[in-house]
Amino acid sequence: MNIKTQLQRPDGTRLKIVSEPALKRLPLYHRFLMERQATGRETVSCTDIGLDLDLDPTQVRKDLESVGIVGRPRIGYTLATLMDQLEQFLGWNNVNEAFLVGAGNLGAALLGYRKFEECGLKIVTAFDLDPSKTGTRIHGKHVLPLEKLSDLAQRMHILIGIITVPATEAQAVADLMAEGGIRAIWNFAPVRLHTPEHVIVHNEDLHCSLAALSQKLFATLQVKPQKTGLASKAAAAAALSN
Amino acid sequence: MNIKTQLQRPDGTRLKIVSEPALKRLPLYHRFLMERQATGRETVSCTDIGLDLDLDPTQVRKDLESVGIVGRPRIGYTLATLMDQLEQFLGWNNVNEAFLVGAGNLGAALLGYRKFEECGLKIVTAFDLDPSKTGTRIHGKHVLPLEKLSDLAQRMHILIGIITVPATEAQAVADLMAEGGIRAIWNFAPVRLHTPEHVIVHNEDLHCSLAALSQKLFATLQVKPQKTGLASKAAAAAALSN
DNA sequence: TAGATTGTTAATCGATTAACAATC
DNA sequence: TAGATTGTTAATCGATTAACAATC
């Protein structure tokens, strides 16, 4: 079956294919709707959304359409309904249990981040190689020895794995996850992982992201020399002389 | 001046404009080269790189070309030279000092992450509103009260700010940063920030990223029912029944 | 009704991929 | 020389933006 065609779910509902850029915008829309809900308004237009998020209204409309959400000409979308539909589509009403491997600084931060649960992600257990960490709890969650991962993942039907180990260990962890039947890996280690075809990897590579940031900054400093204050002028000059 | 044209730096060197996707791949190339260096080989071809990173060789070549790196037909690129050129372009030989605001879990994790320094990012100080945190040190770095940020940023010519506060406070922090002459914000809070035109924002929104991941997982489970083991079949079935 | 907003099709833009000549 | 690999131009693909009719 072509991935481009609309898929049929077991219950007959159609599953729309939404492009990744569009997908990443949906949570932004939802967030804006929450703010707007506080104002008491009951409808929104794509113009409203686009204005706040600095996006083309047409793009917003296309995104909503791609998810199968329809509005009413002249009126826009009903706020509450739209929020529901987005939550539904994003799966925020369900719970996906996940394992996290690597109870270091970053791992601990993710374990302590409660907001993920609102997005349907529940990190249930952490794993680590370091015996000084295993057996402890971090933010209330058990840290188990790594060798238990694969077996437990299978028995608990865990589908999502989060990798926050150093780059050198990441591939080995990914292998264990694949072995345990995990189907999606959220990889925070700065390496590209090789996995079996049915295991998808989503890279959160802060190094790459940082490279993009520095470069954008550098380009900006070149193109638009600051015009506002002495201090900032000096700063820009200092940066250029690097 | 059109941002699309090649820019001229004060020293006459041309500054190439590289697309963001390409930019984010450059660190991956560098990483592969480091691995390869360990094997003792002295040259690489785009095919080698593409094979390891699962990228089209033509794309690799285009990326390198866009940065102004040239190779030799039939030979490829000299490993050491290529690494140097990438580091040069990415600015990893210089140091960019940065301020971080929000000494919570995530903030602390970033403060403790030494690898950023290899990429030219040095987080020099942290800031927080919480008086129980200010005055302390995290991973050796001072945590100062937020009100000192703007003034200090100006005096130290800090150009990069990192935001790891809750969504509700992020905009206020961004305003302070802009006031302090900061020109680039790495924003980990799940909100879109509004900043003056000359301040660029790079969003690292894990919520959005998670949405993309869950959705990809969901789509994969629909399209390719697992064929390998009983356990994983059960897992997939369980997920579908959600 | 008039006008704002959706729905939908077409145009543009940019990035990726393909093709092929140049070259070491 | 022969063949692998770069350099470079063209084709494809997908996402964004523009245009405009339908509609409440």
Image (tube, coloured by chain):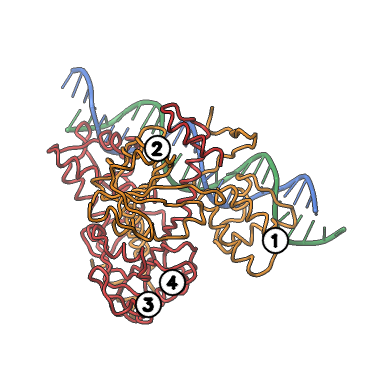
Chain colours: A orange, B red, C green, D blue
Residue D14 located left or right of residue A34: left
Q: Which of pointers 3 and 2 indicates the residue nearer the eye?
A: 2
Residue B149 lies, in percent from the top left, at 35, 78
Give the secondary structure at mark 2. Answer: helix
Question: Residue flagged by tag 1: what amino acid is it?
Answer: Thr
Give the chain of mark 4: B
- What numbered label is drawn on residue B174? 4
Marks 4 and 3, how far apart at CA? 10 Å
Q: Which of pointers 1 and 4 indicates the residue nearer the eye?
A: 1
- Relative to B202, say whether D9 is above or below: above
Asked if both marks, 3 and 2, belong to the same chain, the answer given is no
Give the chain of mark 1: A
The outermost residue toward the left is: B40
Q: Which residue is mark 2?
A: A154
Asked if both marks, 1 and 4, belong to the same chain, the answer given is no
Q: Which residue is mark 1?
A: A43
Callout 4–callout 3 Cβ contact below 8 Å: no
Front residue of B56 and B220? B220
